[in-house]
Image (cartoon, rainbow, N blue to C red):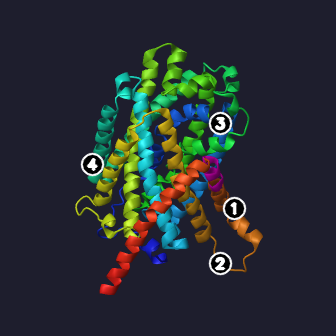
Amino acid sequence: MDESYLSDNREKRPGQLKREIGLWSATAIIVGQMIGTGIFMLPQGFAQLSNPKAAVIGLFITGVGTIFLAICFARLGERYPVTGSAIAYTKEAFGDLPAFIVGWSYWCGCWIANGAIIVGGISYAGYFFPPLAAEPLNQILLSVIVIWIFTAINYFGVRAAGNLNLVLTLAKLVPLMLFIVIAAFHIDPANYSTVSSPELSGFATLPIAVAFALWSFIGFEGASVNAGEIKDAATVKKATLIGTVFVILIYLVLIVLAAGNMPQDELAASSSPFSDMIQQATGGYWAGGVITLGVVISALGCIGAWIMSGARVAYSLGEQGLFPKKFAQIHPKYRTPDFALLLNGFLMTVVMCLSYFNTSVSIYNFLVLLAVMSFLVFYAFGAAADLMLSIKIGAPMRVLGFIRKGAVSLIAFYYSVYTVFGSGAEYVMYGFLLILMGFPFFIYVKLKQKESAVIK
């Protein structure tokens, strides 16, 4: 792909995706993807993997790192507003194979992410319906229905999907604000010194806290992934920065309050921590119920946003010749990537059926860290592509000049590398295996392209 691909796609062309998403809908995609079930399950995960002090510091580090990554993606999205984000940028900067690795990892991450989101959402729904949490068949049926409802909404038009995301995003903020108001008056400072097990004391758990926290920030790239359907380039940058900073501020407040409202051993054992904390603080079932309802709404909105982004990534890979051309197919009437949406829906259904062999909290944390690993490939290459494409070659390159000009990109890149380290050797191995599994697919696509060239 050359510069003309990125430039030509700035304007809507016949047969391409519609540019119908405005600033608030684009921001809602970002906030909708970021605020899913991740933040609602984050106190439990932190309690199981770390301790309050390391968790708050880890969340702050992740927030700062995410801002640097968001700046990289915002700059790229403003310069090159094309669907696919880091896939298109990586192909321009480094070529086909790295771009395929980025796209394959992100695409797989979308299935895994939705699996974790649905597991977390149903875990909270057990607050209302305890039998639901104990009956895998009901969980599978509910999950599949939700996946296909949102697939259908995306299939019939991006404007409807964007507007629904905006409504659900606003709705999910209500219970978060309620939690902040109630929890602020029930902090017990002694809770900040508790741990769920002795080996989690100290700051040795900081790397895993940073990696686990990233799960709740994944989605800040939503505007750049869907840039081909956003009205103008400036909107991509504004939405990315507004959405990311807004979510980071809310997260810091929520985690500090959560750690002060319940001991770590109780948090680690909770399947619906925010609801349990509010019920304990108020002594009323209704308050925990409001939080639970908010989590369910949040999960629904997040699932819809990830279905939208997952299909657009597959579409981008097909458009750039990294997946079969069928993936770049656009519905003639609705102008949406119909084949990619339907295939994503099928694959998500398969993943959900497999995940429900075990619906424990441990499977949730496993899906979270595996999804984080998948997305980190996308983030690291996005930062590297920003470094490659933003530095203009003029005078002779000097090391200090390179560091100065590329400071933001370098910080974002090394933050991604550190978070890969923090994920742990087990998840790095799984992520590497996931990448290797895609290579035969890439080889098949390239051989088909050569075959077509020979026939012509």
Badge nearest the viewer, 4 or 1: 4
Residue 222, position as x, y percentages in the image:
46, 53
Please say if the residues under marks 2 and 1 sit with CB atoms less than 8 Å apart: no
The amino acid marked with disc number 1 is Ala
Badge nearest the viewer, 2 or 4: 4
The earlier-in-sequence mark between 2 and 3 is 3
| Range of residues picked out in magenta | 417-423
The amino acid marked with disc number 3 is Ala
The earlier-in-sequence mark between 3 and 4 is 3
Instruction: Name the one closer to the observer, 173 or 260.
Output: 260
Identify the residue position indicated by label 1 in the image: 407
**Which mark, by number, is residue 393?**
2
Identify the residue position indicated by label 3 in the image: 55
Identify the residue position indicated by label 4 in the image: 152
Please say if the residues under marks 2 and 4 sit with CB atoms less than 8 Å apart: no
Q: Quadrant of the C terminus?
A: bottom left
Q: CA distance from mark 2 to mark 1?
A: 16 Å
Residue found 39% across the figure and 44% down from its top: 303
